[in-house]
Amino acid sequence: MTEKRTFSPAESRQRLRARQREFLEQCMTSSQILAEVMEDFQLTTKRLASWIDQRWFRRELKRMVKALRRVREIEITLGSARAASMLGRGVNNTLASPKDLHRQACVDMIKLARDLEAHERARQQRQTPPGRPDPSTIVHPDVPEEQRDELIEELGG
């Protein structure tokens, strides 16, 4: 069996063609939506699909998506802290009362941050390996009780 070789992000980027690299860079840094970037590059859906079939492009795309996710999480966290501060100053009358739309935007940002935190906690719980199972649940129900107890004792339970 051959060992699977892993490549560093720098090696991965070297295997991408310049046009693919430019496309991903534009997607990451531009305020344009994907369809607009594709139009700028005169890139058809079929061509994009063929790029996605290429291992190196897929790896770089996943790396980019992961980086964008982290940036988004940071922006939401910072934005919710600022929103809470603005709402707090409004309540304490140290700041002129924010308009309803602005106030609602602050509330929405705080809710978004809470949802993100809950999602992250749930993701971490899914990744945490389960604890050791109760030994009595791993013995078949047809095994006599005495034999079951002996088996459980052998397992250290």
Image: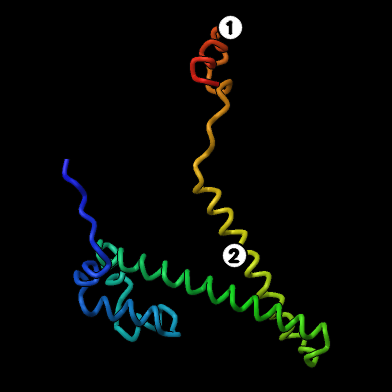
Residue linked to disc 2: 116
Local packing at callout 1 (Cα closer than 10 Å; few below 14, some 14-19, many 20+) is few
Amino acid type of the residue that numbered disc 2 sits on in the rendered structure = Leu
Name the residue: 24% across, 67% down.
Answer: 12
Q: Residue 111: x percent and y percent? A: 68, 69
Q: Residue at x 65, y 65 (%)?
A: 114
Quadrant placement of the N terminus: top left
Tell me the residue that label 1 is attached to. Answer: 146
Nearer to the camera, 101 or 72? 72
From this view, report whether residue 34 is shown above or below residue 152: below
* For the residues bearing labels 2 and 1, Cβ distance under 8 angstroms: no
Q: Quadrant of residue 9?
A: bottom left
Q: Which percent across, then down, holds residue 119?
A: 58, 59
> Tag on residue 156?
none
From the viewer's perspective, is the residue at label 2 or at label 1 nearer? 1
Badge 1 element: helix
Residue 118 rendering spot, x and y as whole percentages: 62, 59
| Residue type indicated by callout 1 | Glu
Which quarter shows the C terminus? top right
120 vs 61, left or right, is right
Tell me where residue 28 appears, x and y as whole percent: 39, 78
Q: Nearer the viewer, residue 112 or 53?
A: 112
The residue sitting at the left extreme is: 2
Q: Which of the 4 quarters of the picture holds residue 10? A: bottom left
Q: Along the horizontal axis of the image, is 102 left or right of 15?
A: right
Query: Left or right of 113: which side holds 64?
Result: left
Q: Determine the secondary structure under disc 2.
A: helix
Q: Is residue 141 above or below residue 37?
A: above
User: Disc 2 to disc 1, how far (Cα)?
Assistant: 50 Å
Q: Earlier in the sequence, mark 2 or mark 1?
A: 2
